Image (cartoon, rainbow, N blue to C red):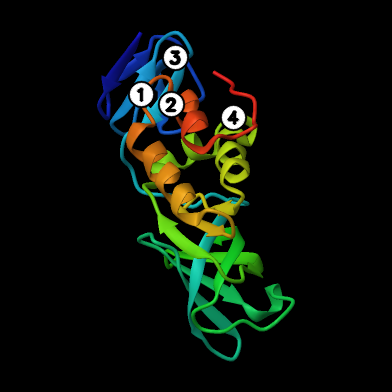
Amino acid sequence: MKRIVVPGEMVDDKPLHLLDAFIEENKTYATVISVYDDEKKMLTPLEGLWYPRKEEVVVGVIEEAKLNTYTVQLNAPYKGIIISKYTESAMNTGDMIEASVKELDKTGTVVLSRPRVLNGGKLLKIRPAKVHRLIGKSNTMLNQISQGTGTTMKVGMNGVVWIRGGDIDLASEAVFRVQEEAHVSGLTERINKMVGSPVQVQK
């Protein structure tokens, strides 16, 4: 059975290690408004801001390039920063990039490492709470959309999606459909039908 839970509401009377949940007195409680699947023990957030975690991959845009640092727009309350020693080549203002979170410093700035410029394509912004559903288990949903539309895609945990090549319009439509229907059963089958992907459907 699926049910909507609000922050602070108990989702299970056993301790479960779930994102967007906390454990107290061996019981599990939601931290954001979510849909909880009692059978699968799965918590799907309906809303929520992105909170940076070490080694997470993000997608953003170089906002300003200075001598030793680059500032990055991350579609989040946090600013990203790349220190030149963590780069292998120069980047320019407006470049779309993929990078990894190194740390969140005391000023609330996300320090990024291993940046890579994403050439061409376009960016979409979705709610960060829906990123896990867009990627899917073992990248199933992401591969389904990418292969079905002939596109190359990168998804940042901050809710920014980069798409290049193939049928970008169809891929974009599929991404937004996942965002809006993430909590509705049968989504994988609907997306499979929409993009005509050869990827095997997994429930």
Q: Is residue 135 above or below residue 115?
A: above
Q: Identify which amino acid the numbered label 1 is placed on.
A: Val
130 sits left or right of 200 in the view: left
Residue 4 at what x, y percent from top left?
A: 27, 21
Which residue position is annotated with label 3? 26
According to the picture, the residue beneath numbered tag 1 turns out to be 184
Q: Position of residue 43 (x, y in %)?
A: 41, 24
Tell me, yes or no, whether the two marked residues, 3 and 2, touch with CB atoms within 8 Å. Answer: no
Asked if the residue under mark 3 is in contact with the one under mark 4, i.e. CB atoms within 8 Å, the reply is no
Displayed quadrant of residue 78: bottom left
**Toward which corner of the image does residue 99 lie, by quadrant?**
bottom right
Q: Amino acid at mark 3?
A: Asn
- Taking depth in this image into account, of 100 and 27 the one nearest to the observer is 100
When the figure is inspected, residue 199 is found, relative to residue 58, above or below; the finding is above
Find the residue positioned furthest to the right.
88
Task: Give coordinates of residue 40: x percent, y percent.
Answer: 48, 13
Q: Is residue 10 visible?
A: yes
Tell me how far mark 1 sits from mark 3, CA to CA: 29 Å
Compared across the picture, whether 79 is left or right of 145 comes to: left
The residue type indicated by label 4 comes to: Lys
Circle nearer the N terminus (4, 1): 4
Q: Which residue is mark 4?
A: 137
Q: CA distance from mark 1 to mark 2?
A: 6 Å
- Compare marks 4 and 3 and give the one earlier in the sequence: 3
Residue at 51% of width from left, 24% of height from top?
17
Q: How many discs mark residues in the rendered view?
A: 4
Q: Nearer the viewer, mark 4 or mark 3?
A: 4
Residue pointed to by mark 2:
187
Q: Secondary structure at mark 2?
A: helix
Mark 4 element type = helix
